Amino acid sequence: MRERPWTTLLVVSAWWTLYGVASTSQWLSMEGADGTVMPLRQAATLGFASAWLWIPLTMLLLWCVRRFPIERGRVAAPLLVTGAVVLGLVALRALAVLAFNPWIGWYREPPVLADVLLTSLANNLLLLWLMVGAAHALLYAARARQRERQAEQLQAALADARLQALTAQLNPHFMFNALNSIAEMVHHDADAADRMLVALGALLRSSLERQSARTVPLREELALLRDYLAIEQVRLGERLRVEWSLAAGVDDWPVPPLSLQPLAENAIVHALSLRTTPGCLSVRAAADGAALMVEIGDDGGRGSPGVHHGHGLATLRARLAHLYGEGDWLVLEPNPTGGTTARLRLPASCMDAGGAA
C-alpha cells in the first residue's frame, strides 16, 4: 500500500466506482410519491457524485493509518489522531456536499451548515471507523507479507552461507592432500612434480571460479576431475589406471561443483594408493529417468575389502542435503571387484528435489 500509491489510488477509485453503480441502481429502484421513477441521468449524478467524493477522503484516511497506526504499545496517541481525522473527514464531506449541491442536487433548498454536519456525522461516522479498521487490516497484512519475504530471504542467505562454508572446508582439505602428493614427488622426480603443480594450478583456478555457483554443467566437473586425476596419475604412475564410461547427452546436466573429485580422492587415498600392483578407477555417468547417475569405483586396496568413508564425503553429503534436501543422494557400497563404488544420484535441478535451494 505504501510502496505503490498509484495502485492504491486505482483500487480505491475502482471500489467507489462500483459503489456508485450500486447507488445509481438503488436510486432507480425508488419511486416517488406520485409513482414516478427518477431519470437515469439524475440517478447516476447522485450515485456517482456521492461515491466519488469518498475517493480523496479514503486516500487521506489511508495516509493517516499508515502514518499513525494503532498497534501494540502505541494506542492512545494514534487513536486520538485518528479520531480527529475522522471528525475532520465528516466535516469535509459536509462542506463538499454544500459546495457541490447546486450542480448535483442533493437538496432542493440548501440547509444550514449545522444540519448538514449532523447528517454527515450520523451517516458517515460508523462508515469511517469501519474504513479505519479495514485500513489497519491491510496494513498488518502487508507487514506480515514483508516479514515473510524477509524471513525467506534470510533463510536463503543462511543456506547459501552454510553451503559456502562447507565448500570452504572442502578446498583446504583437498589442497592439503594435493600438496602432500607433490611434496612426495619432488624428491623423486622434479619434472613430474612440475607437471603436478601445473595441473594443480589449473584445478584450483577452475574450482575458485565456480565455488559460488550452486551447480555447474557436468562437463565442467568432469574437466576438473581430469585435472585432479592427472596429478594422481603422475604420483602413482602405473598403479592408477582410469576407465571412463560417459553416456551421450549428459554433458549439460547440472551438478554441484566439486562433487566428483572427493569421490575419486576417497577411492585413491583409501584404496588404490595402498596397492603395490596396478589398480583401476572407473568413472561412469548416465541418465536414469529424471536423475543423473554417476558412479566412481575402485577395485580395492591392500588388506581386507570394505567400504571406506573419508572426511571429504561427509562434507559432500552435507552439501547435497542443503541443495536437494534429505535423501540418499550419495551411497557407498562394496562392488564385485573387492573395492568400493560411490554412487551419486542427482536430480535435474535443486527445485525438482524440493530441497533448501
Image (tube, grey):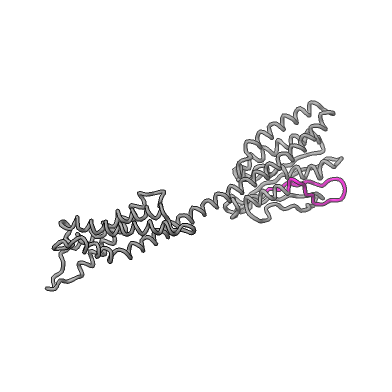
Does residue 149 show up?
Answer: yes
Give the vertical position of 308 relative to 140 (above or below). Answer: above
At horizontal 26% and vertical 56% (from top left) the residue drawn is 92
Check residue 36 for magenta coloring.
Answer: no
Which of 33 and 235 lies nearest the eye of the viewer?
Answer: 33
Hey, which quadrant is residue 49 in on the image? bottom left
Residue 108: x, y in percent?
14, 63
Q: For the magenta stretch, what is the residue range?
A: 294-313
Residue 326: x, y in percent?
65, 56
Residue 281: x, y in percent?
76, 43
For this view, does 313 lie left or right of residue 12? Answer: right
Hey, which quadrant is residue 86 in on the image? bottom left
Give the vertical position of 218 relative to 49 (above or below). Answer: above
Which of 356 and 118 lies nearest the eye of the viewer?
Answer: 118
Secondary structure mostly seen in magenta is loop
At horizontal 46% and vertical 58% (from top left) the residue drawn is 71
List the single residue furthest toward the top. Answer: 191
Check residue 296 for magenta coloring.
Answer: yes
Which of 61 and 348 lies nearest the eye of the viewer?
Answer: 61
Residue 331: x, y in percent?
72, 53
For this view, does 19 lie left or right of residue 301? Answer: left
Does residue 249 show up?
Answer: no
For this view, does 129 lie left or right of residue 180? Answer: left
At horizontal 74% and vertical 42% (from top left) the residue drawn is 243
At horizontal 17% and vertical 62% (from top left) the residue drawn is 111
Q: How many marks?
A: 0
